[in-house]
Amino acid sequence: MLSTSFNRDVPQEVVRVLLDHDSHKMTSHYAKITDQTVRRHWEQATKVNTNGERVTLDPDGPLGQAQWAKTRYGLATQTLPHGYCGLPVQKSCPHANACLTCPVFLTGPEFLPELREHRSRTLTLIQDAEHAGRARIAEMNRQVLTNLDRMIDGIGQTEAADAS
């Protein structure tokens, strides 16, 4: 019953009260989340690319299962501070630690505070570089700033559209 409840999205607090557990830790110990539950939540989660465009996985498409397996494996091994790298682990990244200019980087609303903080730091870096006459550093970071703005705006637009 316990795992079935969690996999039907019954909140842990409700399950804890129904089972008369003393703590969330006890309830968590017995809960088993299925891969299908994780996949359903992943598919429902808002994801945007570096252009601020919403990205969806088609679960019924011909590569639906392969996309999920690739995404799940990538998330488990390449989580970034404010998003996820969608590049298959077997491939090398031509962007060498420049995920915010990488076409397979994905992020969502759960990372908005980090994205906004990163934007602020990037803007400061650009301003300091311009003031010191370091044009190359400023230029390198302008694309990152543009992409951060697109992602933040894309998440905001997606959330506003979902709310209406």
Image: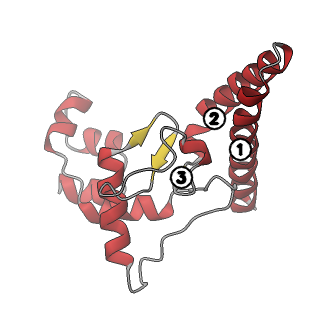
SS type, badge 1: helix
Image position of 113 with respect to 12: above or below: above
Q: In front here: 78 or 8?
A: 78
Instruction: Tell me the residue that label 3 is attached to.
Output: 106
Amino acid type of the residue tagged 1 in the rendering:
Ile
Give the image location of residue 25, x and y in percent.
Answer: 21, 30
Q: Which mark is residue 79?
A: none
Mark 1 or mark 2, earlier in chain: 2
Tag 1–tag 2 contact (CB < 8 Å) = yes
Category of crowding for the residue at label 2, using alpha-carbon neighbours closer than 10 angstroms: few (below 14), some (14–19), many (at least 20)? many
Q: Amino acid at mark 3?
A: Leu
Q: Nearer the viewer, residue 93 or 162?
A: 93
- Give the quadrant of residue 100: top right
The answer to whether residue 20 shows anywhere in this view is: no
- How far is mark 1 from mark 3, CA to CA? 12 Å
Q: Residue at x 44, y 56 (%)?
A: 86
Screen quadrant of the N terminus: bottom left
Q: Which mark is residue 115?
A: 2
Q: Which residue position holds label 1?
A: 152
Q: Amino acid at mark 2?
A: Leu
